Image (cartoon, coloured by chain):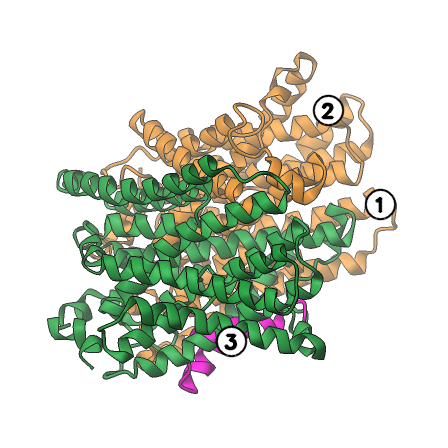
Chain colours: A green, B orange
Amino acid sequence: MNELAQILLDLFLLFTCAKVAGLLVRKMGQPAVIGEVGAGILIGPYAFGLVGRPDDALLHVFGDAETAQNALQTVYNVVAELGVIVLLFFVGLETRLHDLLAVGRRSAAVGLLGVLVPFILGFGFFILIGRPHIEAAFIGTALVATSVGITARVLRDLGVLDSTEARIILGAAVVDDILALLFLAVLKTIGNGAQLAVVDLALTGIAGIAFVVFAALIGRKVVQQYSMHLERIPEDAPLVIAIVLMLGLSVMAGFIGLAAIIGAFLAGMILAEAKEQYNLEHKVLPLYQLLVPFFFAIIGTKVDWRTLTQPDLIGIALAVTGLAVAGKMIGASLAMVGMPGRSVAIVGVGMVPRGEVGLVVAGLGASIGIISREVFSVVVFMSIATSFLAPPVLSALLARPRKREGVFGLTPSAQPKRQDSRTPDEETIYTRA
Amino acid sequence: MNELAQILLDLFLLFTCAKVAGLLVRKMGQPAVIGEVGAGILIGPYAFGLVGRPDDALLHVFGDAETAQNALQTVYNVVAELGVIVLLFFVGLETRLHDLLAVGRRSAAVGLLGVLVPFILGFGFFILIGRPHIEAAFIGTALVATSVGITARVLRDLGVLDSTEARIILGAAVVDDILALLFLAVLKTIGNGAQLAVVDLALTGIAGIAFVVFAALIGRKVVQQYSMHLERIPEDAPLVIAIVLMLGLSVMAGFIGLAAIIGAFLAGMILAEAKEQYNLEHKVLPLYQLLVPFFFAIIGTKVDWRTLTQPDLIGIALAVTGLAVAGKMIGASLAMVGMPGRSVAIVGVGMVPRGEVGLVVAGLGASIGIISREVFSVVVFMSIATSFLAPPVLSALLARPRKREGVFGLTPSAQPKRQDSRTPDEETIYTRA
């Protein structure tokens, strides 16, 4: 078990430093998530190197440094993935399908325009500066997908997951991911030099939509049907069933090509119907507290800050980041005509972070060889910069009318006592401003 | 994130199959843990191969099948390790240092004799059948270490962690692990052909003892001192601090050379002083429910049942397994003279499982080349056989005076309500029989 000793040390450092940094950052009035990502950057392999560097035991198992590094990264990715799955599952638990459908058209419009506008901006900019079409298409695609985890975390920390804006963002994230799936499918096909088959593409899209619709509608029906008959089941069964559903739908989403977190979100939303009956939120909260900080700290370890210091790149990187922000803001503005300015701003900013999704697209582009090392760095910069920009702006926009969150970055809204005392007025407080 | 899709599927299958098999096995009146390990064997790479075999995406990342297999194993090992860490942490939460010290001499005697007798039996048997001394020393060492996770799980499922026998077993497991550390240090030194340095050995032993004493005594003092002043801390802080302590002491134990779970157990025991104040058991239970099944299912995936079918080996394998059982039983009998026969049997059987510890020793012996492929298989057989033998025997010995456990393999004793209703009489019910 020798090689485990280092990995365990890494996990201990990631968790502890993320929590401490989150606490410090909160004391400065900023969202904890920034501290968690920042801690990952600081102790990660590109800065102080306390974590993320394979030690002798791991080298012994894997022979060479690169393979050992890959193995360590795989472990990190699995832990981070479990973290973001639990995060979106938890957010799903706080979301009712009914509420999402109530803002369905807005969500669809925000999702659709928030994909099209950034793609066009990115694609156009790269054509304008004389880069090849395929690279331009790649940059456009990298600007498409929102990392809803970061926004969801901030919304949850501020205790506003039940606001109209939060619902629009969550619904838009689902639409966004289905569209991003199509863009990626096109990009992969073109990148591999194959002919684009419209039929395959249509099937991919239909599979994505079918999964979401079936999971949401049928899953919900089943839960509504059976949750009444489950009175006799043992006390630990609800959480076990919740975990099975969470992992199961995540796996299915992944196999269709959607992000696993879309499945986790749907699983949470399905169980939202039964959550009060079984006190599910209360039971899932400890999983959240253990696993979610790993997701954000591990994102941080992937940030190579040296890419930021290349003077010839920084111009393009800033321009692309600007387009990434502008694209989502314009998309949201167009999709939300007639709604209050602050709501538009909240939704727009909420869609801005690209986070780990941007990093994945960048990695894919590099692995199929359609982008240069420089463009790779630009996408990484854009992903990180948008992720750091959004949380403080979102916090400021949602300027809290009351103090509700705990020092460790979690609102106690999962505690039944406090939740009961919430008045209906609070639900819409942000849309009335 | 492609290679993550398979690993996520593996984790989903491991969890779901472990839970379903655990449920079925319980319906047949056997401990759930047998079902969980059995599920791992069935779906594992040596049987149906539903999990534990790298797919194309993983092969693509790691180049060749063996490296991909190693990487997948590393992920499995990390998840399993987190599972057994949470298990022993939880068991620690249900254990008070005061209660352990009350049976301290018995524990020390059981630990000491439970190490010496099996070593002598194993060593003697291999010398008798004409094997080399170094191999005999290896077999002796492989018979030494108890896998306390399996026993702790069964004791917890039966709701008897507060019995005198459980305390003796837990204390003995700590002593056992310190002694096993010394045996392994000797074996490694001899195996590498180096001179045995008594000073180094003494330092290793002192470090192990010092860690246990300092963690238990000083940690407890600190918690007692500060837990009164923590009234003002946010609601999520206790679990965060618990997780930090659990991972931190696990890492420290690992670096000294002790099993990480010894650190996790000590962390739990330290916090046992504050658990009621912060409802800690209630908060850790969901982590237990998510992570512990992985530990047992993953042990199962490591079982190559084909080693059991080699006719020339099965005789030696059965003999070594018999000695493994006899060694612990004789050790317990000698150490517990004057106590009731059933208590002696419970403690003896409780120390029998070798589980993952045996597999680790076998792996170590193979990696430094002091054992043949055949002896490796014998140790693996012994580890698995003892792990399957102990739970049903332990269940039968502890024939339940009351029904307390849930269908999913967890007793609801962590629910404060039930715990309060427990009478002092129940604590010693098993020693009076």
What's the CA distance linking mark 1 and mark 2? Answer: 21 Å
Q: Chain of mark 2?
A: B
Q: Chain of mark 1?
A: B
Circle 1 is placed at which residue position?
A: B192
Q: Chain of mark 3?
A: A
- The image shows residue A18 at horizontal and vertical percentages of 50, 71
Left or right, B321 with reference to A84: right
Whether residue B122 is situated above or below residue B347 in the rendered picture? above
Circle 2 is placed at which residue position?
A: B374
Question: How would you rate the neighbour count of disc 3 (Cα within 10 Å): few for under 14, some for 14-19, many for 20 or more?
Answer: some
Q: Which mark is residue A412?
A: none
Kindly identify the amino acid type of the residue bearing the numbered disc 2.
Answer: Glu
- The image shows residue A103 at horizontal and vertical percentages of 22, 61
Whether residue A116 is situated above or below residue B378 in the rendered picture? below
Report the residue that reaches farthest toward the bottom: A28
What's the CA distance linking mark 2 and mark 3? Answer: 64 Å
The verdict on residue B401 being magenta is no
Whether residue B424 can be seen here: yes
Kindly identify the amino acid type of the residue bearing the numbered disc 1.
Answer: Asn
Q: Mark 2 or 3, which is nearer the eye? A: 3
- Establish whether labels 1 and 2 are both on one chain: yes
N-term-proximal mark, 1 vs 2: 1
Range covered by the magenta-colored residues = A20-47
- Which secondary structure lies at badge 1? loop
Circle 3 is placed at which residue position?
A: A322
